[in-house]
Image (spheres, rainbow, N blue to C red):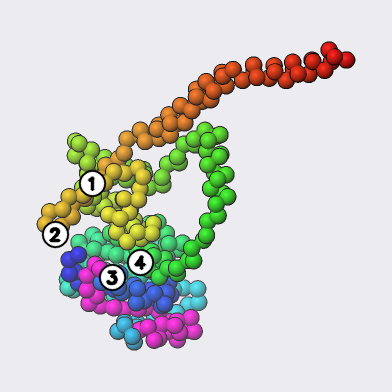
Amino acid sequence: MENRKLAVLIDADNAQASLTAELLAEVAKYGTAIVKRAYGDWTTSQLKGWKEVLHKHAIHPIQQFAYTSGKNSTDSALIIDAMDLLYTGNFDGFCLVSSDSDFTRLATRLREGGLTVIGIGEKSKTPRPFIAACDKFVFTEILRPEKAQPPVAASDKPKTRSTRQSKSKPAVQKEIHPLQAMFTSAIDAVARESGWAELSAVGSYIAKNDPSFDPRNYGHSRLSQMVKKLDFLTVQEQRNGSKLHSEIRLKEGESIDPTPVANSSPPPATEAAAATPAPRKKRTPRKKADTPAAKG
């Protein structure tokens, strides 16, 4: 990424202090945080958790009293400071840390000024208009470190049952992957006549149409790792020196047919085995049963 000069403005009323370190590490991927400010009414008990975090990460707290109950004046203070910083011309982008929809117009105004806007907020609280107004939006859920889950021991019985059911029941069609439509439209937009599309171009197209798209939302650290796990895509890689060039294309829908074809061959063999002269052997015990009756 380019070394952009960024202004990080945090709405402390709608942000989590426990994720400040991960938040700043995410911001560092897009540039250097020249200004770091957090806005809120620091006289309230709700923002006690921010005290140690502000000093540790050199974040400047901006005090804003609530003039009227039920009215949030913190948003207004953040917006005014953002416009002042915009007019200085010293910044390449802004990072707005909030889940509040009130910053939607601010994000669009900053982008109209030619600056990059990165939003960070909670997935369950952030409205869609605020996400769409940013060049890039990162959900705080993916910044939280995941806890390792203990492996579950798989028993052998369910495997045997599943194999028996697969032989008796017809194959069920696969459901469409939730990301298939998005990748299909992106590949169709940037692919060459051969059908292959550069992975970087596909990623840029998706990010422009969906700022919240991030491979980490789906458990992958990079897009190159993610596409390898998608069964509807074909990936080819070529190394040019130290750089790895990746291309993707959509798979043709022919990989589902081999399974039913392979299972269709055994029935004729069983029918041929049933045609052996087994019923003639059953007549022999009848003759033995008739001999004692004749003697009597």
The residue that disc 3 covers is: 27
Residue 247, position in %: x, y?
22, 47
Q: Secondary structure at mark 1?
A: strand
Question: Where residue 133 sits: x, y (%)?
Answer: 32, 58
**Disc 3: CA contacts within 10 A as few (<14), some (14-19) or many (>=20):** many
- Circle 2/circle 4 CB separation < 8 Å: no
Residue displayed at 50% across by 22% down? 268
Q: Nearer the viewer, residue 256 or 25?
A: 256
Name the N-terminal-most of marks 1 and 4: 4
Q: Which residue is mark 2?
A: 242
Distance between the alpha carbons at the discs numbered 3 and 4 = 9 Å
- Please say if the residues under marks 3 and 4 sit with CB atoms less than 8 Å apart: yes
- For image coordinates 45% across by 41% down, the residue present is 175
Q: Is residue 117 above or below residue 190?
A: below
Residue at the disc numbered 4: 120
Q: Earlier in the sequence, mark 2 or mark 3?
A: 3
| 110 with respect to 157 (left or right) | left
The stretch in magenta equals: 29-54
Question: Residue under circle 1?
Answer: 236
Q: Any magenta on residue 44?
A: yes
